[in-house]
Amino acid sequence: MSDRTTRRRWRGPLALGFALGLGLVHLRKLLAQGASAVAGPWDQVLAAEHKVVMSLLDRAMDTPPQARLRRKLLLAKIEWGLSKHAYAEETVIYPALRALGGAGEKSLFDDHAEIKILLASLRDRPADHPDWIEDARALKALLETHMAEEEATVFPRLRSALPEAQNLRLTTLLNAQSIRLA
């Protein structure tokens, strides 16, 4: 059999493999979005992401210190979720707040910076270190305060200040950012 015949024989399977690979990338992105992909409007998407992160953090805090790998894996999920979430807020929601002349988004950015610092501390510290749980508690307290402010004040104020068409646009932009980062 000639080299030319062999190459022809492999063209179909290679093309199929390539196409499947491309399709799997998009499927992975949709699956990685999880609850946020089906939550609905932008404020509900963000609130759903808040709940997922808090659930993961509770699981990490309930994990015994000896289960270092489990803690680190849960922390990696928390970091990824918060990074994706913060990026979407910082590039879609907070600019919309600023456009309305809303004061206070600086404190939201400051919270995000402090959250990132606490995450780095948890990541860099051994998961069985006695201070690990204290850092996790500090992170949880900050997240609870930040998320409560967003869900009770910031999101409702922004949603009610915008016409429905702009709220739909925010949802579309938020979903696009989430898919891009997934």
Image: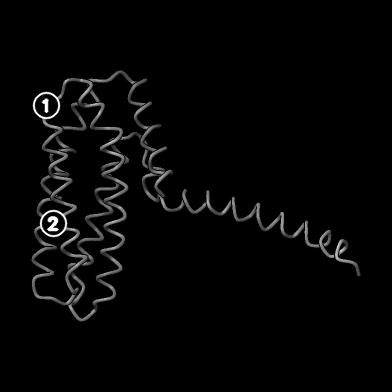
Q: Horizontally, is 42 left or right of 23 in the view?
A: left
What secondary structure is found at the residue carrying circle 1?
Answer: loop
Above or below, comparing residue 17 to residue 173 in the picture: below
Q: Nearer the viewer, residue 166 or 112?
A: 112
62 to the left or right of 2: left
Q: Are marks 2 and 1 in contact (CB under 8 Å)?
A: no
Which quadrant of the view contains residue 110? top left
Residue at the image point whose x is 41% and y is 50% from the top: 182
Q: Earlier in the sequence, mark 2 or mark 1?
A: 1
Circle 2: element type: helix
Q: Which residue is mark 2?
A: 139
Label 1 crowd (10 A; few <14 / some 14-19 / many >=20): few
Q: Which residue is mark 1?
A: 103
| Distance Cα–Cα, label 2 vs label 1 | 24 Å
For label 2, the crowd category at 10 Å Cα-Cα, with few meaning under 14, some 14 to 19 and many 20 or more, is some
x and y, in percent, of residue 141 in the image: 9, 54
| Residue at 30% across, 18% down | 163
| Residue 124 screen position, x and y as percent | 19, 67
